[in-house]
Image (cartoon, helix red, strand yellow):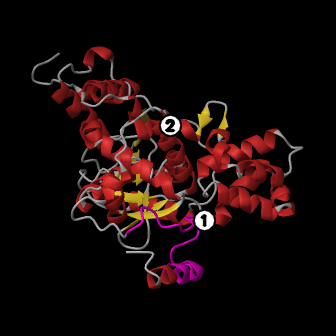
Amino acid sequence: MDAADPWPLSRVMSNLARPAQLPMGSSTFVGRGQALANAAMLVGRPGPVRLPLMVSGPIGVGKTAFALRLADVVSSEFPDGQLYADMGNCEPGTHSTYQIMRGFLRALGVPAPLVPDDPIQRIGMYRSLLAQRRLFVLLENVTDEGQVRPLLARAAHSQVVLTSRARLLGLDDAHRVDLDAFARHESLELVGRIVGAERVESEYAAASAVAEICGDLPLAINIVGRKIAARPEWALAHTAGMLADRDRLIDSLCVGDVNVRDRFSAAYERLSTAGRQAVHELGIGGAGWTTAVALAASLGVRVDEADDALESLVDAGLLTRASVAGRYRVSTLVGVFAEHVRHEAAQLGSPLRDRRAQREAPGVDCSVPPMLPVNAARPLNEPRTQRAFGAMERTGETA
């Protein structure tokens, strides 16, 4: 290779391929209209550089499906192709990232002998191609900022989209789209798209009950919808009745190689000891919300330590922030999962702190319960919820 021209783009630009690496999107995609419009506006915003777009949200909320639908919406802006990588399969560090970069260069038509071995030169070639071409790059399941920094570039014509459960706050200058569970009408639309709108119309209350039990989580609703579609003799009310069994709920959300438990478990296993203890506490009060003060009282730790633990659960995709400052929302499904892992940890003799010792810890307000028993599916600004919360405050049930 010519030392004066370490990556001779002039010799390969005319023969570059047009990659089409994006996986197949969902034919049952529904909702997200405003979020898609906002994301498309951010992608199309004029400027000297297209900033990366960060799509984040809890487990099962449909981040990849959203990104793939966005790719369809803005496809006319990126006629030179699409690149894709699942970063969840990469180990921490940069080696795997550089292997992905090599694959991208080969997909773009760069001959193998011309792909630089030197990491810095490889980054330079990749970024130069992004700057000169109009490409849509999707990096899915990003776990940390270090994975993707080499894959970001100052490119006026190419767009990089990231999906992650974590917020990746270490990334500068990124547009952000945060996804949450569906609104109820979106959940029912998804059920209707899978099993037939006429079945939803004829058993509207049962369909709504299914969505309620699933916490309006797109992944869970999709799984249940597929199971119903495969058993047309089942009434929706029958399915809702089976899902109402909390002991079997998580394990019943499984179809083929897609299931909710594995995703929750994988996130749980990656948590620190403090993070796992926080999950165990979520399993005491069921679905609702919690606070750092409440968790500190339960675990006998400082409030700032409890807040760090809860933030780690947000980045793991197991919690979301509530609309009331300082509160974290615990979904129905995460609450049930937390009950299971707490029970399993107790059976295995996992060291959980003695609760009496926890409540006698100095400096901890022991009057705060570990969990406020409020239905997470009900919006916090909904009048009934506000009245209920106000009543709890008046009777001293909240901090």
Q: In x, y percent, where is residue 330? A: 49, 58
Residue at figure coordinates x 46%, y 54% from the top left: 282
Three-letter amino acid code of the residue under disc 1: Ala
Q: Which corner quadrant of the image does residue 25 belong to? A: top right
Q: Which of 384 and 143 is in front in this view?
A: 384
**Which quadrant would the N terminus be assigned to in this image?**
top left
Q: Which mark is residue 307?
A: none
Q: Are marks 2 and 1 in contact (CB under 8 Å)?
A: no
The residue to which callout 1 is attached is 183
Q: Which of 4 and 249 is in front in this view?
A: 249
Residue 8 falls inside the magenta stretch: no
Residue at figure coordinates x 36%, y 24% from the top left: 103
The residue to which callout 2 is attached is 344
162 sits to left or right of 380? left
Q: Where 12 falls versus 331 (above or below)?
A: above
Secondary structure category for the residue under label 1: loop
Residue at figure coordinates x 26%, y 56% from the top left: 301
Q: In x, y percent, where is residue 36? A: 51, 60
Between disc 2 and disc 1, the foreground one is 2
Instruction: Tell me the crowding category of disc 1: few under 14, some 14 to 19, or many 20 or more residues within 10 angstroms, Cα based.
Output: some
Instruction: Tell me the crowding category of disc 2: few under 14, some 14 to 19, or many 20 or more residues within 10 angstroms, Cα based.
Output: few
Residue at figure coordinates x 57%, y 51% from the top left: 333
Q: In x, y percent, where is residue 322? A: 44, 67
Q: In x, y percent, where is residue 166? A: 36, 49
Chain part drawn in magenta: 368-389
Q: Which of 373 and 252 is in front in this view?
A: 373
Q: Where 267 falls versus 31 (above or below)?
A: above
Q: Can residue 317 be seen in this view?
A: no
Residue extending farthest left = 4
